Each structure stands twice: as C-alpha cells, then as structure tokens.
Image (cartoon, rainbow, N blue to C red):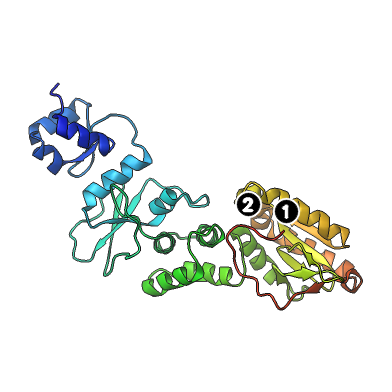
Amino acid sequence: MRSLPPHFADLAEHQQQIASRAQLLAAGFDDMYLYRQTRRGLWQRVLPATYALVTGVLTDEQRRISAALYAGAEAQLTGLAALVWYGFRQSPRTDAVQLVVPHHARRTSAGFAVISRALTLDSRARATPFYPVCSPARAVVDAARGLRQLRPVRAVVAEAVQRGYADLADLDEEIRRARRSRTALVRKAFAEVTQGARSAPEAELRDCLAASTVLPEILWNPRLRDAAGRAVPTPDGYLPEAAVALEVDSQEYHFRPGDWARTLDRHNELSRLGVLVLHFTPAQIRREPHRVRRSVEEAYESRRGLGAGVRLRVDVSVTPTPPSGDPRG
C-alpha cells in the first residue's frame, strides 16, 4: 500500500484522518487510487469528495470535520451538533451535523451533513482549528427551528440560560433574527424562561396546573421571607393561602452536583416552617398530568387558610430572573 507523503500525513493526523478530495489530489493521489482504497475497505468515502483514511465508526469530531470540509471554509457549525460541541446535557442527540453557509453558497445537504443557508452568518461564532461554531444563542435557535416537539426545545432553552451559555438578550436577538420561520416553539419556551421557568419539567408543571379550575394563581420561584425577615428557600411553585410548595424532582435536571442536595435542604427547611412540600418527577408530570393536578388541588383545598399561620411573606421587591446555576438555597 502506498504510504502517505510526510507533509500530508501530518495534515491527516491534524484532521483526525479526515481529508477532502482536493487535499488528497494535492498530495499526489489520483481518483483511481481513492477508488481502490475505498473499494478495498481501507478508506471510507463518508461524504461527497470527503474521505476518512480509517475504517470503523467515526467519532463525533470526525463527523464534524468531515461535514465542515464538505460544506466549505465559510460554513459554521450550528444546531444540535453545536450544542453537543458546547456540552449541553439536555440536547437531543442526532447523527446529523448541521452547518450554515452564506446564501450564495451552492452546497446542498448530503449524508449526515445538513446544510442551511443564511443571509448573514453569525458574527459571534467561535473559531476552532477546523470550523467556526455558532454562538450558543444562535445554535439554540437553529436547533429549535428543526425540532417538532416543545419538550426538547424547552430543555435546551432552559439549559442555555440556566448554565450560563446564553443570556436572555442574546436569545431574544436570535429569535428576532429568525423572524417567524419555524420559531413558534422557541418563542413559547423563551417566554416561559423570561417568566422564571428554570427547566423544561417545571414549564410542563406550569402547563399542567394552568388547566385547573380550583387553584388560584401559583407563585413560581418566589422569594420568601419568614416573620423575622430572613430569606427562606425558594420552591419551584408556592400557594401562599394554603402554604403548599411544589417541587420538580429529577437529578437529570439538576445541573451541578450539589443541586440535588440543596433540593432536599429546601424541603427540610420549608417543612420545618409548616409548609407542605409536594414533589413530582418529570415522568409523573408528563404521563399523569391529571393525577398531579388532582394532588395539588386536594392539598390546596384541605389546607386553604393555613397559610396565614405559617407567616411567610413573598418578597415582591425581588424579581426572580433565570440565573446561572441554581441559587435557590
């Protein structure tokens, strides 16, 4: 087998054994040699005019490099592929690698490379050795535009803000840039986050309880103080008239190691003050919304009027905002 020229071997190693046809031809190989290598199973043609100089399943990074070489130097990584690159934990996984190219570019989608065109590329894209990566806000909106269900859109929007990948202003700017093109779901998820929802399951709980004809307005993520004015742990939801707190429990949606322990601390402290804390998992909210709603309604009706004895007040001087991390105490 013909060995790789030293200068090209260095390039191939740098590109994790991915190369374009143009690079291979420039290194002195011809199309017949490329054909024989792939026919023998020594190389793989992974995309048009794009080769892996190894066999086996490509890594995520090899797929991104392959898609970037195919799409061209101006292409920017975006969508779910970019969210995976950033390390989003709640992002849906996909084999597709989405890239955005200038509107005049002639590249079209092929294989796992999904190409979309834009009048303007992302000026805040981050440079990497192989491809620019759109900013988290741009990647979140581009990913959301390709999703068909609200739940994963909620998850990535909430995580973007919760973990500090993007702030509300950046997300709002990107949603406005996208206008009305497949943005209904991301607009709804963004509105929930601006109203204080810290996770997708919490937003689902809000939807679940909004259908109740029994419950009064629920305070979401309220800042509470005791009779002495000391801050009290903030529950996900609170019914002050009945002193009933609502908590969404899932280690999956706690983004730092200490968050789960702090949830338990909130429960203990609120219970000590006379608050009834109801816990629901995301699976319960999703699969048994009627049962969840009935549980909250029954707790509210059985404890209506007890809130005055608990002597907690809502600190209206503080407007809850979606923070980075979970500072609820």
Q: Quadrant of the C terminus?
A: bottom right
Q: Quadrant of the N terminus?
A: top left
Residue 163 in picture, x, y percent from top left? 54, 57
In the image, 110: left or right of 25? right
Q: Secondary structure at mark 2?
A: loop
Circle 2 sits on which residue?
Answer: 254
Category of crowding for the residue at label 2, using alpha-carbon neighbours closer than 10 angstroms: few (below 14), some (14–19), many (at least 20): some
Q: Of 229 and 293, which appears nearest the observer? A: 229
Q: Amino acid at mark 1?
A: Thr
Q: Amino acid at mark 2?
A: His
Furthest-right residue in this view: 309
Q: Of 275 and 258, which appears nearest the observer? A: 258
Q: Is residue 52 visible?
A: no
Residue depicted at x 47% and y 51%: 92
Residue depicted at x 50% and y 66%: 167
Toward which corner of the image does residue 298 lie, by quadrant? bottom right
Residue depicted at x 43% and y 69%: 183
Task: Tell me whether the residue at label 2 lies in contact with that at label 1, contact meaning CB atoms closer than 8 angstroms.
Answer: yes
Q: Is residue 221 visible?
A: yes
